[in-house]
Image: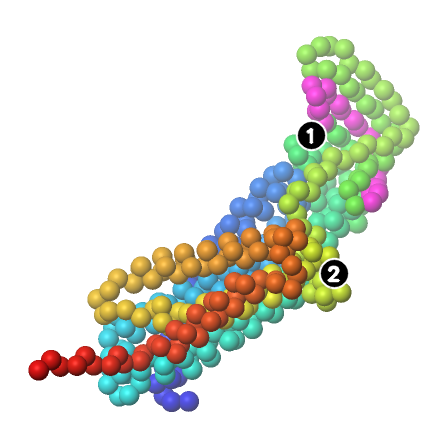
Amino acid sequence: MLLIERHLLRQFALSVAAVAAVLLLVGLGGLLVDLMSEIARGKVPAGLLLSQLGLRSVQVLPLLLPLALFIGLLLAVGKLYGDSEMAVLSSVGLGPQQLWRPLALVTVPVAAVIALSSLWLAPSGARVASEMVENAKRSFLVAGLEAGRFIELPGRAGVLYVGELSTDGTRFRQMFVQSERDGRLDVITASEGELLVEGETGRFLRLRDGFRVEGTLDSKDFRLMRFGENELRVPDVAPDAGDDELEGRSTLQLLARTDAGARAELHWRIATPLLALALGFLALPLGRGEPRQARYGRILAALLIYVNAMVLLVLGKGWLATSVLPAWAGLWWLLLPMAGLAWWLFRIDGRLRAPRPVLP
């Protein structure tokens, strides 16, 4: 590798890394806001905040890294032209087509990382994150309950307090539960009890030796009952209707399935690294400009190209899942034209136009 190619490779890599760091920070901020909202609604235990944030950050890598690669390369190529470095390189016989080798040495490894994330890391992260939330329902400790402290029940359905808690978080002593539903107040105390889990969503408290007071808030008609043993269902939050269980399936499991939803998810995972390759090679011809030309226009153009490509990919995934598009078509109808455009621009990039004939 020539010394100048090493210099260009370093510039390209540093630019992509800087943009990726900024986008990841922004993405982590958005994920943190979403997680805090889910914790407030009781969907995710507060004790799993950091682990869920880390696992979900892996899931957004296939979405953020193609954009980071595209913008980073556009800025780096634009800097070469803006600082007249490209004019100096051209004077020693290095034209735009000689930039493709260092660009490929940055684009291909980033696309490989995206493929690794999309095909393996992101599904594994989604599966582990879901399993952690499900396991949290089996223990008060993971759900954030501490002895001697009041906590809010999921969905703001009431408050819960225990005086003592076992080491595994399933048995307790001196419990107080207050809940409200449809204008009725329900207060339960128990000397001891345990947490029982039935199925995927059913959680029950088996209480022993306690009292129960219930009645309406707008009247003084309350009933007091004493029980030797009683069971109380812990409110759960239903999963979002848009949650896709296929996101947690491994790629090998998707390959073994023939239904439309699995095929759509499989094509989506394959498309993201290929999209990164196409965007990476489009960055060189699109990044060319005049020395005094503003660079921010390239960023806007990159965002528009990326957003349009992602919108088409999302639409294509939906069409595949609903069988509007046949499975063999996949998302190639978008990826192949982009690859063809990148190849065509590569062939014509840097060619000198034929001089105009001089009129006599």
Q: Position of residue 325 (x, y in %)?
A: 62, 56
The residue singled out by tag 2 in the image is: 258
Residue 186 is covered by the magenta coloring? yes
Up-down relation of residue 182 to residue 55 (above or below): above
Q: Residue at x 27, y 73 (%)?
A: 81
* Amino acid at dot 1: Gly
Looking at the rendered structure, which numbered label has been put on residue 264? none
Label 2 SS? loop
Up-down relation of residue 175 to residue 318 (above or below): above
Q: Nearer the viewer, residue 214 or 111?
A: 111
Q: Nearer the viewer, residue 340 or 235?
A: 340
Residue interval drawn in magenta: 179-199
Q: Tags 1 and 2 in contact by the CB under 8 Å rule?
A: no
* Amino acid at dot 2: Thr
Q: Residue at x 43, y 66 (%)?
A: 70
Q: Position of residue 82 (x, y in %)?
A: 26, 70
